[in-house]
Amino acid sequence: MAVIISNGKGTIKIPNEAVGQVAYMAAKECDKISEITNGTQKCKNGGRALKVTTKDGAFEIRFGITMRYGANAGDVSAELSRLIRERVAEFAGVENLKIFLDINNISV
């Protein structure tokens, strides 16, 4: 699936996988998480860790993390949301995102 964006300059099709890779790289910038997971396994790339779907012309991004011990879950969630929104907006010009985060584990 993909989101199709049209304006006066033309039309662009943005695949879910591309947005997933951008979101994955943005999540790796957060020093409060130690792993990006799909629930049980550590993932080395965004392909298995992130699930990106499109609904009503917007992207929905779902993924799991292992949070570092001592980090505040609310702060981690806010930072990840900000990073992902900024990077996806820079990449695709899309600001209509829904981000779903699962904290699967805490690393010591």
Image: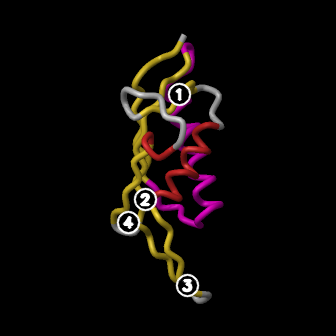
Q: Taking 34 as reference, is 43 left or right?
A: left
Label 1: which residue? 35
Disc 2 from disc 3: Cα separation: 18 Å
Give the residues in magenta. Answer: 69-97
The disc at residue 1 is 4
Residue at the spot of label 2: 59
In the rendering, at what x and y percent does residue 66 appear? Answer: 48, 24
Q: Earlier in the sequence, mark 1 or mark 2?
A: 1
**Earlier-in-chain disc, 2 versus 3:** 3
Dot 4 or dot 2, earlier in sequence? 4
The stretch drawn in magenta includes residue 29: no
Disc ID at residue 7: 3
Q: Residue at x 51, y 23 (%)?
A: 67
Q: Main secondary structure of the magenta part?
A: helix
Q: Please state the horizontal and vertical placement of residue 45, each as a whole percent of the image.
A: 53, 41
| Residue at x 65% of width, y 28% of height | 31
Any mark on residue 67, and which? none
Q: Are marks 2 and 3 in contact (CB under 8 Å)?
A: no
- SS at circle 4: loop
* SS at circle 2: strand
Where is 24 relative to 105, above or below? below
Q: CA distance from mark 3 to mark 4?
A: 20 Å
Pick the residue in front: 16 or 78. Answer: 16
Q: Please tell me which residue lies in front, 88 or 77.
A: 88
Residue 40: name its quadrant.
top left
Q: Disc 3 vs disc 4: which is toward the camera?
A: 4
Sequence-wise first label, 3 or 4: 4
Q: Nearer the viewer, mark 4 or mark 2?
A: 4
